Amino acid sequence: MFDIDRWNEIISALKKNKLRSLLTAFGVFWGIFMLIVMAGAGKGLERGITEGVGQVATNSFFLWTESTSEPYKGFRRGRYWSYDNEDIAFIKNNIEETDVIAPRLFGWRGGNNTLRGDKYASFYIKGDYPVWTKIDPIDILKGRWINDVDVAQKRKICVIGEKVKEEMFKPEEDPIGQYLRVNGVYYQIVGLIRPISTIHINGRTEESIFLPFTTMQAAYNYGSDVHMFGITAKKGISASVVEEKVMAALKEKHSIAPNDVQAIGHVNLEKQFKMFSNLFMGIQILTWIVGIGTLLAGVIGVSNIMLVIIKERTQEIGVMRAIGATPRKIISQIIMESVFLTTIAGYFGLFFGVLLLEGANKALEMAAASGNKDIFIKDPGVNFGVAVACLMILIISGAIAGYIPARRAIEIKPIDALRAE
């Protein structure tokens, strides 16, 4: 431990080079400041996207049909085809690695397809089985979701999103039990929902009207068509592996060329989440590279200012050596001056970096409270481990920045130092 006199000596030495010390300290300040802000922003982006995903099944994938790109078994190229009800049991019976199999129908949104009294609007229309929410969970605000009885009896009921309620009903009105006319057919509202995630499949959930799958098939003459499948893999099995098996089986069943990559449209959430995970890792690595690089520039500045200070204190060092000061004592004093400078500058960089992140967090919370749902950054900030790592970097950097000038100082012979002007 250094006594108060030693600290006074350190401060006095830095005051003699006030302007240089301030400019050098700013380099260290900026390095830590940028490291904290970038790390906090990156973590906020990760939290925002992760929470935006909500509880969507990450082991799921979605399949729909496109026109064929290869002729096969007498069928021409460019043939349009579709899934059907038989495919539900076919997938379940032939691909044992599948868990949830959720077919979906979706209607065209346009032409004011929804009517209530004198109010017209246009919404997404979707036909679902109850199991769809095992893939894309929802928050039920009032009433209930579609159930098995609705599907079996082809009931003319519907579940609506928040936006549908806002546009078709007054704020004080309860939509449950009321009727909507959708594409010419009346449906009784049994549920009001909102999405848990920001992932929107076939349109925003809050702007959608959901019908029982079989009801939608019958009401709009879809026959046995299925527009899309949402499928999850069993626990411990890769969704990518299951996806390839399901696609191959469906191609064989519907006489599609095995090498036709266009005939089945598909999205694999497992792959998407892995891509996001790699992206976040890349952001973290880039953050530390840029932050440490900026900090290194500041540390080099500290080392340079220490060289200047030592040159101006050559005689003082010579006197200290002449009266018996050991090299270790001189080195420790110079290193202490360097660590002091970097620590103070770094502390302020850390403080203002955290302050900026807290301010940004408050602004984001206010924006979210005002109803802005397009915010993709949440709780930007750094954890305790990052703060400790920054402090360790500061101490080590300061010691390194001071050690090189200190070694040079003790190489000066006392007699030469005393003669220096």
Image (tube, rainbow, N blue to C red):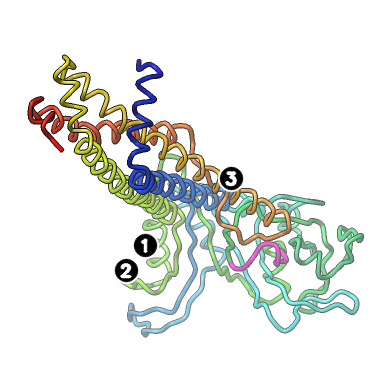
SS state under label 2: loop
Q: CA distance from mark 3 to mark 1?
A: 51 Å
Up-down relation of residue 150 to residue 1 (above or below)? below
Q: Position of residue 206 (x, y in %)?
A: 70, 62
Dot placed on the residue nearer the N-terminal end, 3 or 1: 1
Quadrant containing the N terminus is: top left
Residue at 51% x, 55% y is 231
Q: Foreground residue, 149 or 380?
A: 380
Residue at 73% x, 77% y is 122
159 with respect to 109 (left or right)? right
What stretch of residues is rendered in magenta?
Answer: 202-210
Residue type at numbered disc 1: Ala
Residue type at numbered disc 3: Glu
The answer to whether residue 225 is magenta is: no
Q: Position of residue 241 (x, y in %)?
A: 36, 52
Q: Are marks 2 and 1 in contact (CB under 8 Å)?
A: yes
59 with respect to 261 (left or right)? right
Which label number is shown at residue 258?
Answer: 2
Quadrant containing the C terminus is: top left
